[in-house]
Image (spheres, grey):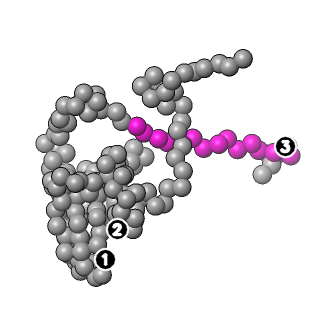
Amino acid sequence: MRKANGSKVRRSQARFRNYVHVSPEKVNGAEHNISEHNKTMDSIGMKVVSQFETLAGRTPRDYSDEPEGGYDIRSEGLGETRLIEVKTLSGPWGARGVTVSRKQMSTAFARDDRFWLYVVECASTQPRLWCIRNPAWVATSYTFADDWADERFAEGPFVLA
């Protein structure tokens, strides 16, 4: 692409978005408190997903309190098993995204094509559901922006002569 004067247009590289949350409560071993709003949203999301799975001909079962964890719903039928992690948002699914825990990602890596991420957006008004087949399968690399240059995550910087 060229400018009006004939010189080339330089395209800047798009900035990657990455988010890392380190919970002080988790680091210190304390329990994480979930707000009443989040509990309500989670309940709506679970109902939406269960209804969808039933309509799709599968039988969903709530696994959110199971000790092995890593997903919220196990849904079986039509010759397949889906291990579904449900993320629920009260409004539209935007740039902030949804968060998947380390345990959930470990389950995604270990369970191949059976792991699904379901995102329920606009749960407070008109719920919409997005079904994503194992995101760990899709990702081919992970990019770490300079946010990682923090003493909590990295040692350095080191200057070698």
Question: Residues under labels 2 and 1: Cα distance?
Answer: 8 Å
Q: Earlier in the sequence, mark 1 or mark 3?
A: 3
Q: Amino acid at mark 3?
A: Ser
Q: Earlier in the sequence, mark 2 or mark 1?
A: 1
Query: Tag on residue 126?
Result: none
Q: Residues within 10 Å of mark 2 (few under 14, many from 20)?
A: some
Residue at coordinates 13% horizontally, 42% vertically from top-left?
36
Q: Amino acid at mark 1?
A: Glu
* SS label for mark 3: loop
Q: Cβ–Cβ below 8 Å for labels 2 and 1?
A: yes
Q: Nearer the viewer, mark 2 or mark 3?
A: 2
Q: Which residue is mark 3?
A: 7
Q: Residues within 10 Å of mark 3 (few under 14, many from 20)?
A: few
Question: Residues under labels 1 and 3: Cα distance?
Answer: 56 Å
Is 104 placed left or right of 51 in the picture? right
Residue at coordinates 51% horizontally, 24% vertically from top-left?
155
Who is closer to the viewer here, 98 or 138? 138
* SS label for mark 2: helix
Numbered range of the magenta stretch: 3-20
Q: Quadrant of residue 159?
A: top right
Residue 160 seen in this snapshot: yes
Image location (x, y in percent) of residue 89: 28, 51
Q: Which residue is mark 2?
A: 114
Q: Cβ–Cβ below 8 Å for labels 1 and 3?
A: no
* SS label for mark 1: strand
Q: Which residue is mark 1?
A: 80
Image location (x, y in percent) of residue 48: 21, 64
Image location (x, y in percent) of residue 118: 31, 61
Q: Amino acid at mark 2?
A: Arg
For the C terminus, the image quarter is top right
Question: Residues under labels 2 and 3: Cα distance?
Answer: 51 Å
